[in-house]
Every structure is written in structure tokens, then in C-alpha cells.
Amino acid sequence: MTDLPQLLTDRLARAFSEVAGDHADPAVRRSDHADYQADGALPLAKKLRRPPREIAAAILNVAKIEDLVAKAEIAGPGFLNLTVADSALTRIVEEMAADERVGVATVAEPQKILVDYSGPNVGKELHVGHLRSTVIGDALARLLEFLGHDVVRQNHLGDWGTTFGMLIEHFADSGADPTSDDFALGDLTDFYQAARRKFDADEDFADRARRRVVLLQSGDAATHALWKLFIEESEKHFQGVYDALDITLTPEHNVGESAYNDGLPGIVEELDRLGLLRESDGAICLFPEGFTGRDGKPFPIIVRKRDGGYNYEATDLVAIRRRLLDLHADRIYYVVANEQRLRLAMLFVAARDAGWLKPPATAEHITMGMVLGTDRKRLRTRSGDLPKLADLLDAAVQRAEAVVSEKAPDLDADERSAVARAVGIGAIKYGDLSNDRIKDYLFDLDQMVSFDGNTAPYLQYARARILSVFRRGEIDPASIKGSEVVLTAPEEHRLALRLAEFEGVLHKAAEGVELHRICGYLFDLATAFTAFYEHCPVLRAEDEKTKTSRLVLCDVTGRVLATGLSVLGISAPDRM
């Protein structure tokens, strides 16, 4: 194990338990007064009714931490200040250097985890409202996969419903030939808005659109062919944006609402057999316990509408049933907007009532805040529309190109273009992921593409600078493999300390779906490396042993930065 905080926690936990006579948390955390401090003596003292400093002394008396800690002191009312031994740090860094995964172990008990994310509607373009679900969901899937879980990605496309009657009828009115070689729907957003305006203004068109819905749902061949056309054109657009954003979703991950149509009658039969359905105003409903409307009456999930049709609530039931019973998912993460909180909470209760969702399986709504503009309101264009995601990506790459041209004028045109794309796309993703997902955040492109502060370009540049050390010295990193690490300067100690936290950060980020923890860690690591680089000569070190040791520190830091960024879905250029 290379997770230093966990090693300290495990050792101290045994001592705390011995003193307490029961399990007790040592509460290890970073400290401004030492490398770490353990705060657990204070709550334990209250429980045992003994002075906390006396408890702390008893813990130190039985703790087996000599190989990890060089100095342990009792401070204040009973804190344990811990300075990590250099020998422990060198052992961990050397282990990381020798490991292709830089010391990150896979989980002992892998699970099958389904991640539902992005979920755009067919017939519309991806916009800023899809950014957080897409970026957070993809980073989560990458992280879980890296840690050894069996990850199932699903993109729950909105590809069914009354909207398609409007879109198909508008297309039919256009007279376009879908079989021609140069056929394309063009701008999906413009097409949708034109159809909507026509639907709202023309009652005859609205009637025809409603009849189209009936034709679609009854399986009319011509209508079904046009519906498939919208799906194909939309999927082309989605994939183009996913590829530009370096998202791992592919067409094989697309599972639209329509994929569950054949299960709708069966879901009604099953829930009725279980005694969970009731009729309400002609509709067949399910009433999960604990949910009421403003009038205080029970709030329903409408399983079948009064007219015999089905809506997305019924589709959700079929989907979660298949995910649990057919795909055998141990965990399901719904990475969707906070506005879906009530819908999903009711869905999970319904799935438990039906006996589909039961321990050890779990389902969780991964909520997220909004993307705000500089006016601190939901980000919109000047016309009031939600910005297209493709436009935001283009703008980010353009801004990055200007910054990269100024920062690295020696790059040739092709390399500069590639670096600008990596910086621009990385900036948008990191700008999102570095914020606590449950909070709103400000979308500021100028700050995102900056090489200063907690940004992707700062981390990318730190890693590129490390590679430049090896290029300048004409040193192959493989040639220092197995070399001894020696820590003499405080900056070396602090850098090694940060490196020894990497494994734990990834596992804790996965446990709480807190991707911003990885970003914060990588920024701290890059900052520690900058201090090390400024104070500890590498290629001009005082002797060969020190030089080789510092090269190992450089190599491991570079690999950790690259691995951490990769887990987040951000590329790290070799030159910047």
C-alpha cells in the first residue's frame, strides 16, 4: 500500500481501540504544525471521561508507528502532531516508481457499476445544460474503471414521445429527400425551434403532428423510418461533440427510451400482481410512500396514462428493473440534473417496493449545480438561449491557442494546434470537475485557460516541464528505474509527502463521488513540485546520487500528474 494517510490511520486505529476498549477513529488529517495530526483523542476523552492529553499519551505509548513516524508530539488539548519519517516516504516513492500504476491498487472486491450520464434529447443539439452530466459522468466512469470495477456506461437518450410527431411532420412538410447523398438535417436546434414555432402557431399542423405521434406509436413504417432518421442524425451530432470533448461514450452506449417500449405492458402486469398499483383519475399509478403534493395528497408515478399510453416515468421503471435484474448491476449512478431529484427518489423507492432494488445493490442520484455566466445567472447566449456545447468547445480552443502561442512560441503550427486543443478542452473539463459537483460554478474561459492557479493548463504545464528535464539531460526515465530515493531538503520531503497521498485520494474520490478532491490534490502536488524544482537543482545536483534521486521524484510526479489527469479525462501534452 502506498496510501500514507491510510497507513497511519490503520496503525493508530489499533492503538485507539486498545485504549478505548472499542473501535475509535483516530481522525488523521493534514496539519499546519506537522505533516499530519490525529484529533481522535478529544472525542475519546469525552467518552472515557479522562483528560484528552492523558488519552493522547496512552495512545502514543501503545502505538506501533516507529517505522512511519519520525516524531510524534502531543499538542494543545490533546492533538497528536505527526512528522513522517523520511525512510517511510522513500520506501513509498520507490514502490510507486517501480509500479506501472504508480502505487494505486485496484479494489479488493470489484463491482458491476452502471453509470447513466449525458442523456440528451434526440432532435436537439447538446448545450451547456449537458456539460456537467457528461463531464462528471465520464470522469466517474474512468475513475471506477481505473480502480478495477466493471463499468457499464449508458447514455439514456430521449428518443420517444410526443415531440417526435412535431419534428417528423415538419420534416415531411419540407419535402426533403432523406435518400439523397447530400441529405442532412442541418442545425438541429434551428430545426427544432422552427417546428415548435409552427406547432404553436398553426392548429392544422398541430393536429397533423398529434396524428403523427399515433402513427409512430402504432408502428407505421414511413413514420418509423423518419423517426430513425432523426435518431441517426442526432447521434452523429452527439458523437462529434463527445469526440471533441474526449468523452468515452460511443454509439454502443446509447440506450434510448424507446429501447424499453417492449417492457411497458409487462411492467404494468408485474406491479399489479405485486399489489402496488391504484387507479387515479383513469390513470394507473404507483404511490411510493413518503411523497406528497402541495395539497398533502400522495404523489403518484403514472405507470399508464388515462388514454392507455406511457410516459418517461414508466420507461424509468422498465430501465431500472433491467439494470438490476438483467444486467445485474451492483450499483447504479444516475448522473443527471438536480431538477430530477424528486423523480429519481420516487423511482428508487418504487424499485425497492417492487423487490428489484435490494441489498447489496444500490442506486444513487449524483446531483450537480448549475453552470453560471459572469452575471452569476444560468449561462446563456445574448439572445437568451442555452449556449451550444460545440460552440463553447470551439471558443475554449481559440482562447487556448492565443495563450499557447504566447507561452510556447517555439512550437510548430501542428504541435501548437494540438496543444491548444488539449489545453482548451482540458480547461473546460477541469473548470467543471475542480468545483464541488453539488454547487453552482462560474464559467470563466479566461480563468480556465490561464496557466496560473488551480487550472488544467497549470497542471499540464507542470507535467510538460518535468518531461523537459529528461529531454534536456538526454536521460531515459527507464534508466533510473530501481534507483534509491534520498530526501535531504524540506522541499523533497513535502513533495514525497504529497506523492504518498495519491492512492488514497483516488479511492476516497470514488467512494464519495467527489472528483474535485482529485483536482485539489493534483494542484497541491503541482505546487509542491514547483517549490521543489525552484529550490532543488536536478540536472545540476551536487552529486550523482542526489541527481538520480531527484530524477526519480520528477518521474513519479510526472506520472502521477498524467495518471490523475487521465482519470479525469484530460490529456497531458509532452511539450508546452
Image (cartoon, rainbow, N blue to C red):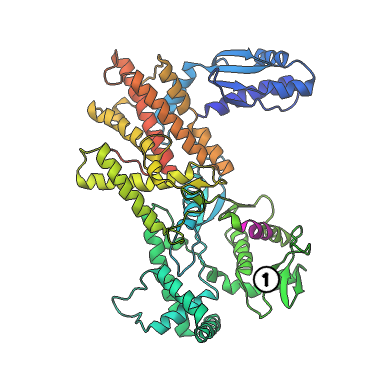
Q: Which image quarter: residue 439? A: top right
In the displayed structure image, the side of residue 107 where residue 399 appears, left or right = left
Tell which of 306 and 555 is nearer to you. 306
Q: Which image quarter: residue 512? A: top right
Q: Which residues are magenta?
A: 340-347
Per the image, is 341 magenta?
Answer: yes
**Quadrant where the image shows the C terminus:** top left
Per the image, is 245 magenta?
Answer: no
Q: Residues within 10 Å of mark 1 (few under 14, many from 20)?
A: many
Residue beneath the point at 37% across and 48% down: 425
Position in image of residue 123 (x %, y %): 45, 70
Where 5 falls versus 383 (above or below)? above
Where 110 falls versus 176 (above or below)? above
Task: Tally the marks.
Answer: 1
Tell which of 111 and 366 is nearer to you. 366
Position in image of residue 140 (x %, y %): 50, 47
Residue beneath the point at 43% across and 43% down: 430
Pointer 1 residue: 303
Position in image of residue 378 (x %, y %): 51, 54
Tell which of 70 and 440 is nearer to you. 440
Mark 1 element type: strand
Q: Main secondary structure of the magenta part?
A: helix
Where 431 falls versus 23 (above or below)? below
Residue beneath the point at 35% across and 47% down: 424
Residue 34 appears anywhere in the view: yes
